[in-house]
Image: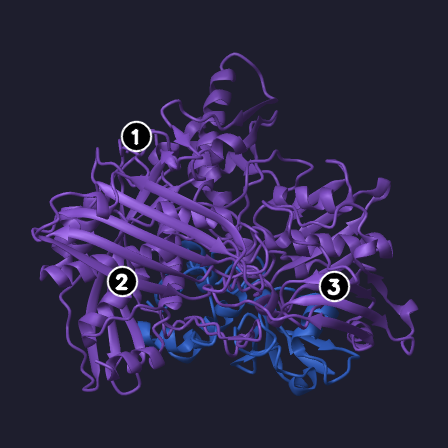
């Protein structure tokens, strides 16, 4: 670290920390809005069919509420995203594709009136048989094929070759941000609508609002309130909440608060895509990795949402952090009649890496070698080529994190409880930072940067603070580049009428891609201030380096600008009587390029790791009639402080030349490694292999019994 | 309805069956207390009533008649943060911050009840408060830092 460092690499206090520990931070539902109505969404009760009739019972005095139907949508009845398949509201006589399909919206002065009004609405359906089974799903959202070298059948010299085949299944998972979805819509003069909401991506909401409400750029104003967690769950869904609130506010001519309770949030909002991943891996007896043939099927639910992009990331990461000369990955995402699945930290990669990592274990077992040694033999290193043909030219931390984790993990001590067996498992993963392929090039994320007359500086960005530290680290990057004290830099509010579109706050891209723009803009302003006087303003947009090549049609080339790497070691106790799995210790070594704020970087790793522990062990969603049976927090369990293992993070700094001061994106990476390490640890403890997560007591006991 | 809120006597004309959570947030405009689930599972609405941590979504305001209620707004003394609040900032125990008020109050009671706490004690004491951001590690560090 150079002597001039004033900000980067220091764990300074979080910008909004004082507000968050005193209760002053204002989240959406904390905003007092005089005269605002309360909103409510009336949803379908069948998973598939057609609406036969909608009746507002005249026994209720309907003048007391505002009712919005699909006929009240001034623009297009579409939730703008990738494909125009999801309606804002189902029409009378229109199609129903999942059990939580929004049909009507209500607003009233108080919640009791809303509940009363809802009880006077009758909706009749002509139901048709729904599709829930992946094998029976016929509608395709997207497919991807990645091909490198030859397929197994075309290889010669197959004597002395072992072929291992195995199928894995991963379940739904809820993001479970502790603040449920919510937005407040304000009708403004000139037909404008202002939204204040809990959201990750102000411009996603802005675009969706413009289209459904037929608004101009200026008429749609989207402001992020303090946001109580997102994890992908507030990437696309807030568009729906905002449009609904806006439709009600427009019709009522008054502000409307549409705040979901936990039950509605769990029942209706997007989940992590479940799926089935099948591997066929060929190796020589000496461990040489010869070929990988991988098939991925993800369940997209009722509407497309971000499914094609999730599938793409799943496919690109499917071969794991290993160098293999011959790879075929065939991936598809299908439609079913569950509520739509969508963005969740990791975005398909945790699913495919879970399978890839367990395959290393199964191959090692077949060969009778240590899976640690096999990983060392296979791992991608500098100069190696990935499944998409990307040559890794810098910041390849595979070996660094592998060695660091192995060195840090203490020897396993047996449990002192007689019915409990303890085991250890390890995983090695990589995760692409930033958007896939040409994503960043198409997006051209932009920021503004101002030097103000009073000697302070202001960053204008649509990148949001959702707990991960954007507000703090952007100021650190700017202060470092300018060589000024940290308190001289502030971040403008995330308000689309003030800040340019920096792209969504997703995909492990904020610190690395947008953060780099902050660094570049600050550097430019510093230079200009040598000749010019403040105030002055610059804009910076992402420019794809010439060295990055990606072909969308063949899926060949540089899938990501760079990858972050992690090695995770999990120690797990399995109670042989109850089948209960407890992760007791987790060590993760992470190559983050450069830790801009070490405590926040560790915080990302620890929080993401625990979400992965939950996904692997206790977070199970049971389906019934196309809905989630455990759609309450009393029945959908996430890890508490008592369930959580000790998590030890080792930050390995391995700078990336185009990252801000060397940093790479690590937001999603910790979601990838723990699940396969835990399943390997369960095997180490019990001798049984689970092919499916979550590893519930029922699955553990049944696997042990059938052994 | 009379009770003591953050050291000050309050007198309210409200229906006794209303949730304490709603009375705090809507009648008294103290929005530091959050609603995460409305059924006593997440602890985001934790407040302290006569020295005990309770979920204010499960408490009818009539039940706190004559009690001493402390919310997150009552922790800091004037503008001065408590050692615990300071430790939450320094250790990175607050990320998105939505669980932070409840977590702070649960930790505050824990620290008041016992001066010597192990990591296991802290885990046990905070088990009723869910956090989805931190993995709890930094929260536990922050609380333990206040036992020294």
Closer to viewer: mark 3 or mark 2: 2
Between A544 and A287, the residue placed more toward the observer is: A287
Mark 3 and mark 2 on one chain:
yes
Lower position in the chain sequence, tag 3 or tag 2: 3
Lower position in the chain sequence, tag 1 or tag 2: 1
Determine if residue A172 is in view.
yes
Lower position in the chain sequence, tag 3 or tag 1: 1
Between A669 and A296, the residue placed more toward the observer is: A296
> Residue A518 in the image: x percent, y percent?
48, 31
Establish if A570 lies above or below A345. below
| Residue wearing tag 2 | A166
Q: Are marks 3 and 2 in contact (CB under 8 Å)?
A: no
- Screen quadrant of the N terminus of chain A: top left
Establish if B98 lies above or below A224. below
Q: Colour of chain A?
A: purple
| Residue wearing tag 1 | A3
Question: How dense is the environment of label 3, judged by Cα within 10 Å: few (below 14), some, or many (20 and up)?
Answer: many
Q: Chain of mark 1?
A: A
> Residue A551 in the image: x percent, y percent?
41, 31
> Residue A83 in the image: x percent, y percent?
60, 46
| Residue wearing tag 3 | A103
Mark 1 and mark 2 on one chain:
yes
């Amino acid at each position: 670290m150079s002597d001039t460092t004033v900000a980067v690499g220091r764990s300074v206090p979080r910008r909004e920390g004082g507000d968050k520990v005193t209760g002053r931070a204002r989240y959406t539902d904390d905003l007092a809005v005089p005269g605002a109505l309360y909103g409510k969404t009336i949803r379908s009760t069948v998973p598939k069919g057609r609406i036969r009739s909608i009746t507002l019972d005249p026994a209720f005095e309907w003048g007391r509420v505002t009712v919005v139907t699909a006929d009240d949508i001034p623009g297009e009845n579409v939730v703008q995203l990738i494909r125009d398949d999801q309606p804002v509201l189902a029409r009378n006589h229109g199609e129903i594709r999942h059990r939580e399909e929004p049909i009507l919206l209500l607003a009233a002065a108080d919640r009791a009136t809303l509940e009363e009004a809802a009880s006077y609405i009758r909706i009749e359906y002509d139901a048709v048989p729904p599709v829930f089974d992946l094998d029976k799903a016929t509608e395709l959202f997207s497919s991807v094929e990645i091909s490198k070298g030859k397929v197994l059948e075309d290889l010669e010299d197959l004597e002395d070759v072992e072929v291992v085949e195995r199928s894995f299944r991963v379940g739904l998972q809820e993001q479970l941000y502790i603040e449920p979805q919510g937005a407040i819509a304000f009708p403004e003069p000139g037909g404008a609508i202002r939204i204040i909401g809990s959201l990750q991506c102000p411009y996603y909401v802005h675009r969706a609002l413009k289209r459904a409400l037929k608004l101009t750029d200026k008429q749609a104003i989207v402001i992020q309130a303090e946001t109580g967690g997102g994890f992908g769950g507030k990437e696309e869904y807030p568009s729906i909440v905002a449009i609904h609130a806006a439709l009600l506010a427009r019709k009522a001519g008054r502000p409307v608060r549409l705040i979901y309770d936990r039950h509605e949030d769990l029942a209706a909002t997007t989940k992590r895509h479940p799926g089935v991943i099948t591997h066929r891996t060929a190796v020589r007896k000496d461990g040489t990795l010869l070929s990988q043939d991988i098939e991925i099927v993800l369940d997209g639910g009722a509407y497309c949402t971000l499914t094609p992009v999730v599938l793409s990331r799943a496919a690109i990461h499917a071969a794991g952090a290993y160098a293999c000369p011959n790879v075929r990955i065939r991936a598809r995402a299908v439609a079913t009649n569950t509520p739509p699945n969508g963005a969740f930290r990791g975005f398909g990669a945790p699913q495919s890496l879970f399978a890839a990592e367990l395959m290393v274990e199964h191959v090692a077992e077949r060969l009778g070698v240590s899976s640690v040694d096999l990983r060392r033999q296979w791992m991608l290193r500098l100069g190696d080529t990935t499944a998409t043909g990307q040559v890794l030219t810098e910041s390849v931390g595979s070996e660094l994190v592998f060695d660091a984790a192995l060195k840090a993990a203490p020897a396993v001590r047996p449990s002192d409880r007689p019915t409990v067996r303890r085991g250890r498992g390890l995983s090695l993963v990589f995760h692409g930072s930033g958007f896939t392929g040409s994503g960043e090039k198409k997006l051209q994320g932009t920021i503004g940067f101002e030097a103000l007359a009073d000697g302070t500086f202001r960053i204008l960005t649509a990148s949001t603070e959702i707990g991960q530290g954007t507000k703090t680290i952007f100021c650190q990057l700017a202060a470092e580049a300018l060589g000024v004290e940290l308190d001289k830099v502030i971040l403008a509010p995330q308000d689309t009428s003030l800040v340019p579109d920096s792209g969504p706050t997703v995909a492990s891209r904020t610190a690395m891609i947008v953060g780099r723009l902050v660094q570049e803009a600050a550097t430019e302003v510093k230079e200009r201030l040598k000749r010019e006087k403040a105030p002055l303003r610059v804009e910076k947009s992402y420019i794809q380096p010439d060295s990055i090549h990606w072909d969308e049609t063949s899926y060949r080339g540089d899938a990501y600008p760079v990858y972050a790497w992690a090695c995770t070691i999990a120690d797990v106790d399995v109670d042989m009587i109850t089948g209960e799995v407890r992760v007791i210790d987790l060590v993760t070594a992470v190559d983050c390029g450069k830790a801009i704020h070490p405590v926040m970087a560790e915080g990302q790793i620890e929080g993401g790791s625990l979400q992965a522990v939950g996904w692997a062990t206790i977070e199970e969603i049971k389906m019934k009639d196309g809905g989630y049976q455990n759609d309450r927090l009393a029945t959908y369990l996430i890890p508490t402080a008592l369930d959580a293992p000790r998590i030890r993070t080792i930050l390995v700094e391995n700078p990336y030349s185009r990252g801000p001061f060397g940093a790479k994106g690590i937001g999603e990476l910790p979601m990838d490694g723990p699940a396969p390490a835990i399943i390997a640890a369960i095997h180490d403890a019990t001798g049984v292999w689970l092919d499916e997560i979550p590893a519930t007591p029922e699955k553990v006991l049944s696997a042990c019994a059938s052994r | 309805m009379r009770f003591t809120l953050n050291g000050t006597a309050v007198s309210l004309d409200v229906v006794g069956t209303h949730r304490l959570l709603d009375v705090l947030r809507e009648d008294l405009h103290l929005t530091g207390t959050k609603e995460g689930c409305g059924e006593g599972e997440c602890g985001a609405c934790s407040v302290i009533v006569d020295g005990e941590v309770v979920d204010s979504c499960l408490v009818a305001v009539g039940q706190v008649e004559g009690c001493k209620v402390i919310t997150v707004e009552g922790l800091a003394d004037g503008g001065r943060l408590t050692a615990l609040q300071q430790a939450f900032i320094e250790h990175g125990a607050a990320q998105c911050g939505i669980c932070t008020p409840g977590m702070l109050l649960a930790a505050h009671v824990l620290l008041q009840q016992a001066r010597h706490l192990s990591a296991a004690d802290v885990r046990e004491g905070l088990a009723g408060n869910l956090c989805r951001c931190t993995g709890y590690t930094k929260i536990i560090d922050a609380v333990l830092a206040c036992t020294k």
